[in-house]
Amino acid sequence: MMALSQYYAAVQGKTQKSIDTLYQALTTLHGIREAKKMTATIADAWKAEGREEGWAAGNAEGEVKGQAKSVIMVLESRFGEVPAGIQKKLKNLQDVEQIEKITKLAATSQNLKEFQKGL
């Protein structure tokens, strides 16, 4: 129970004192058994929320990395060898909107210099 209270305090930015007060109120109102059920349900909800956020972040990161590889392939097909500096910048991108813009730039640039200016 204490571990759950500490986790809640860390995630929600609450003080331990306020969490202890919440726990005491729950145990007083609903008894220890009911309080344990309620806090277990809350913990399960937090875990599920954390998993969903993690999956969403992982999917977005994977999408960006995959699209960055595609941009490099397009540039290589159009202009030959792509300098390591450009490849590094592309591989370090983290924003989906940004990589989408750069994908269009790779398809429309007249040469690598023009692409690099837009990068």
Image (tube, rainbow, N blue to C red):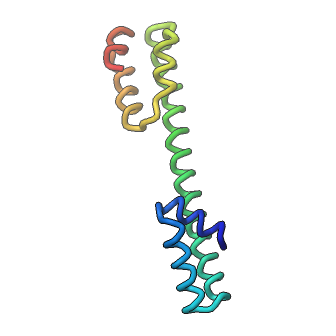
Seen in the image, is 107 located left or right of residue 84? left
Q: Residue at x 33, y 15 (%)?
A: 109
Q: Is residue 118 above or below residue 50?
A: above
Residue 112 pos. (x, y %): 39, 10
Comparing 23 with 59, the one in front is 23
Q: 109 or 48: nearer the eye?
A: 48
Q: As rendered, which of 3 and 47 lies closer to the eye?
A: 3
Residue at the spot 51% in from the left edge and 25% down from the top edge: 91
Residue 100 percent coordinates (x, y)? 39, 33
Q: Quadrant of residue 4?
A: bottom right
Residue at image coords 32%, 19%: 118
For the point 42% across and 36% down, the residue is: 95
Left or right of 5 on screen, residue 118? left
User: What x and y, as percent, mark residue 10?
Assistant: 54, 59
Position above or below: 73 against 98: above
**Quadrant into which the C terminus falls:** top left
Q: How many marks?
A: 0
Q: Quadrant of the N terminus?
A: bottom right
